[in-house]
Amino acid sequence: MHHLSRRFLVATLPALLWPPLPAAAAQPPLTLVTSDLPPMAMQGGLGQRGVLLDLVEAVLQRADLSVEPDFFPWARAMLLASEKPRTLIMPLNRTPDREGRFQWLIKLYAQRFSFMNLAHQPRVDTAEQARSLRVAVLRGSSNQGRLHELDVRPRQLIAFSSIADMQRALQRNLADALYGSELIHNDAWRRSGQAPAQLQTGLTLESADIWLAAHSGVTDAEHARLRQAHEALLADGSIERLFKRYGLRFRPEDAR
């Protein structure tokens, strides 16, 4: 009996040292959806997926919550993130109409939203000008709602599924102007081989904070780990170095 008791103790020792994980740890795995939005997010190898997606992956890895991103057109990514718990989405603008619909996990950056058009055309400097133009917007983005507020008529808004499609429409005279992220459009224009001077920026309507978010299901413990990992990467200069690697200016106040 003494021999059996000793064997029983050895067999049960791991359970005594490492008790069962709490119920929160039994959650389904996290997933991450995004879209091709250079220079923020783009398809590529690890460390070459855009400045904000690289940032998110570094945070997730540091928090021991690594997730492989899945790319979709933006409207599809939004639908998946809105319907499926524990689905992370980035880069998501934090707007009043979205405030109660998502868990806001980490502020990634702040960006400006502006009208852009070809440099040989009159620059779009006023709301009155915009109301007379055909304006290309990204389907599923909050930009459509902002232009509705500006009284740009719905029939003048042309929604496209990608940044590349928006810019092709501008070049082919299917749209008179673009409205969207100045950072994204300038980078995409340059990457497509176009001369930067051919695309001009006009009226800026708003700036918005960009976040990593989820509709639901991220636990308080996971959220705390993400915040702590993000703060650590800010503190040690990792995020600033990441922005510089992409040739982008980093301002600490835009990342907090």
Image (cartoon, rainbow, N blue to C red):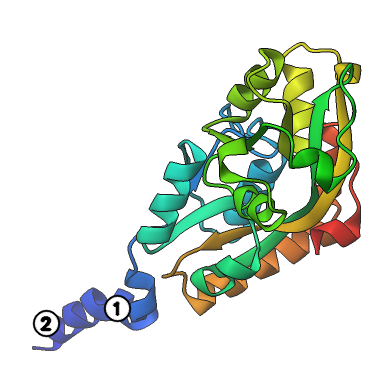
Image coords of residue 36 (percent x, y): 57, 33
Residue nearest the viewer, comparing 98 with 253: 98
Disc number lying in front (2 or 1): 1
Residue 164 seen: yes
Tell me if 241 is positioned left or right of 135 in this view. Answer: right
Image coords of residue 50 (percent x, y): 68, 35
Which residue is painted at 58% across and 27% down in the image? 45
Tell me if 188 is positioned left or right of 251 in this view. Answer: left
Which image quarter holds the C terminus? bottom right
Which residue is painted at 69% across and 53% down in the image? 151
Q: Secondary structure at mark 2?
A: helix
Quarter where residue 223 is shown? bottom right
Residue type at numbered disc 1: Ala
- Nearer-N-terminus badge (2/1): 2
Residue nearest the viewer, comparing 75 with 245: 75
Q: Which residue is mark 2?
A: 4
Q: Which residue is mark 1?
A: 15
Residue 31 seen: no
Which residue is painted at 14% across and 82% down in the image? 3
